[in-house]
Image (cartoon, grey):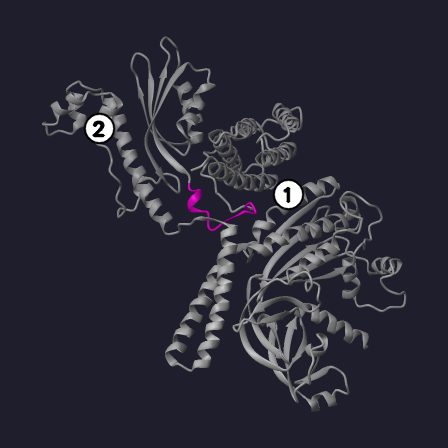
Amino acid sequence: MSDDMTTQVFKEEAYELLGELETSLLELEDVPDDMDIINRVFRALHTIKGSGSMFGFEAIAEFTHEVETVFDMVRNGELAISKPLLTLSLSARDHIYSMLESPSGEGDFALGNGILDGLKDVASGALGGAPAEAAAPAEEPEPAEEQAAEAPAAEKQVDAEPEDQPLRSLFQIIIKVAAGSEVDEDSLDSLLQELGRLGDIRSKVLHKDAEPWWDVVFESDSDSMSIEEIFFFTDIPVTVNVREVAREDVADHFAPADEIDGEVEAGPVKKLGEILVERGDVPSEAIDAVLADQKPLGELLTEKGVVSKEKVDSALAEQNATKQFKTASKKARKKVDTASSIRVSAEKLDYLVDLVGELVIVQAQISQVVSSKGDPSLTALSEELERLSDELRDSTLGIRMLPIGTTFSKFRRLVRDLSEELGKEIDLHTNGAETELDKTVIERLGDPLVHLLRNSIDHGIEDPETRASEGKARRGTITLTAEHSGGDVMILIEDDGKGMSKEAIKVKAIEKGLLSADQDLTDKEIFNLIFEPGFSTAQSVTNVSGRGVGMDVVKRAIDSLRGSIDITSEQGKGTIITIRLPLTLAIIDGLQVRVSDDYFVIPLSLVEECVELTAKDVEEANGQQFVNLRGEIVPYIRIREWFEVEGESPPIEQIVITGLEGSRIGVVVDTVIGEHQTVIKSLGRVYRDVEGISGATIKGDGTLALILDIPKLFRTVLAEVKAAG
């Protein structure tokens, strides 16, 4: 593997670990005594440090080591979690990220030293730090729960679980006390307790020779150097020798013998004689000399005086532990093999989607040619090709789907930092993090959500004193929810703040000339005024808001995703912002229609039904563009008139009834052709701002069909209905 590739591998792992680190630090604010979370923080730092040193990122390794040392104090019960500690730790996380992004790998040296100085002050109690009260022995660290964090834009990870399994090893550790030293067993036990923080002690045998020493069999996902570091800083005069016995991939902690499935066979395990020879306790000739006897080898060796009983017991313990270790390892690998995964770059996925899109177009062309031939055998093959292309399309798009929680996770940090800056107390709750969206949609959704959350924090949630005076809880709440709604995904940002003042919005709109003083607007139309460029009701400009830049950007971003955004608000109660987005931007199911010689596609997820429109229906409406649909008056828009298509309308036209946000409108066309797999192609600059069009697709015969922007047409029709009274 080239240096560039190894560096990229390290960075990818580090980015994921930093994402987990940030999440864990934020969780500690709510549960500061949760040892599992503390262990996750420590393990993330330890892994970044070790990998950084291995791949030549010495500055990152040294900086992370200092932060890790502070959290080692937390693990040992010497330091309590505090807000200053978490704030500095989050800053340290950001600094490590900037070091990864820096070409030199070093980042801002002065900033890094400032963070470390702050952590030292916290550890010493000079900056809000405090020793943990009545600290119980730290719990044994468990393997980190590797969570899917926000991956770099260049990467997408599909089910990272198998790659995140820790690599565990079995070690023999010889701990000898320096000659002439007076060390009691309790002192040695304290060393073993410290060792136990890195893994599991499988056996320990105390040899009471002239100088007592421990023979320990130890299981851990740490390396031998990390184990030896435990003994570097002890005041006890000992020498330590660490020997790796076995190394396997295991998913969980070591399984006790009585919990291991008997049907899973252990791998080859060294025999007792081999272990003793390998340890240097017995010469191979002595083994050969006693093998002829029928007694167990360990007993025979003891009787012959070749080796002490303690050494035999220790070797037997290693043999038994190794057997169990390999059995559990094989069982774990069997489980992992059923859910293997790989890491694929986003560029490769995008290229695959493009290829599938072209295949769908070719398949449509083949189907069109075959239908004109009337050959049954060709028709059968064409139908099979269509089925396979449908499955390939769905499978490929499924690969690009990511849980929206990858975007939600970073907002906890935003809410924490900004609310602290503004002197507010705010909790962020998230629901539906498992809801899946296309990777491209998620990437482009991040900035609009940041704008909306910042507005909720700044404009929506009041300061604690104001909330208390109004009978509210001092802590405000922002709830971020994602859920499926038909063929779309709906995202809601809800706060329990002061809500929006319709009167204040109207006054500001009149000042800016956006409406006249006597103009009557619905609540929805009033709230939508905040999406106008330069509109802001803030009384003063801050570094957060007030310049009128942001909400119009949000509106354009959501529109570019073929989505819609709406606001409902009640003064004194709070505000709900609803975003509706398509699942994917690549391929959709559409309804193909024709007006004269031009073809259009309507997203099938919005189509409810198709009905006829006759000259009699038009006459009965007295020139109004409404149709009576089973007692319901439904407005409609003529595509021929909207796009100024030449030619006469047929005697009987077709109305495609579409539904959106609880309302219905009709789209009048000449002919409804049928369903069509639509590979979405973006429009060039000349046509990008044409109202009513969101994209284009290539039909089976190679000609173009325009994709109708139904939400835009909806707004236009409803505005015309409102204007007509």
Measured as percent of width and height from the top left, residue 429 is found at 63, 51
- Vertical relation: 242 (above or below) 503: above
- The answer to whether residue 324 is left or right of residue 517 is left
What kind of element bears circle 2? helix
Q: How much space separates mark 2 and mark 1, taking CA atoms?
A: 55 Å
Task: Determine which residue is flagged by label 2.
Answer: 274
Residue 15: quadrant of the picture: top right
Badge 1 amino acid: Arg
Does the rendering let one see residue 637?
no
Residue 622 belongs to the span the image colors magenta: no
Measured as percent of width and height from the top left, residue 127 is found at 67, 26
Residue 156 belongs to the span the image colors magenta: yes
Q: Quadrant of the N terminus?
A: top left
- The answer to whether residue 459 is left or right of residue 494 is right
- Vertical relation: 327 (above or below) 298: below
- The residue depicted at 33 percent of the width and 18 percent of the height is 213
Badge 2 amino acid: Glu
Measured as percent of width and height from the top left, residue 439 is found at 56, 54
Q: Residue furthest top?
A: 180
Q: In front: 7, or 543?
A: 7
Task: Tell me the magenta residue range.
Answer: 151-165
Residue 316: quadrant of the picture: top left
Picture mark count: 2
- The answer to whether residue 329 is left or right of residue 595 is left
Measured as percent of width and height from the top left, residue 634 is found at 70, 80
Within-10-Å neighbours for mark 2: few <14, some 14–19, many 20+: some
What kind of element bears circle 1? helix
Task: Determine which residue is flagged by label 1.
Answer: 413
- Vertical relation: 523 (above or below) 670: above
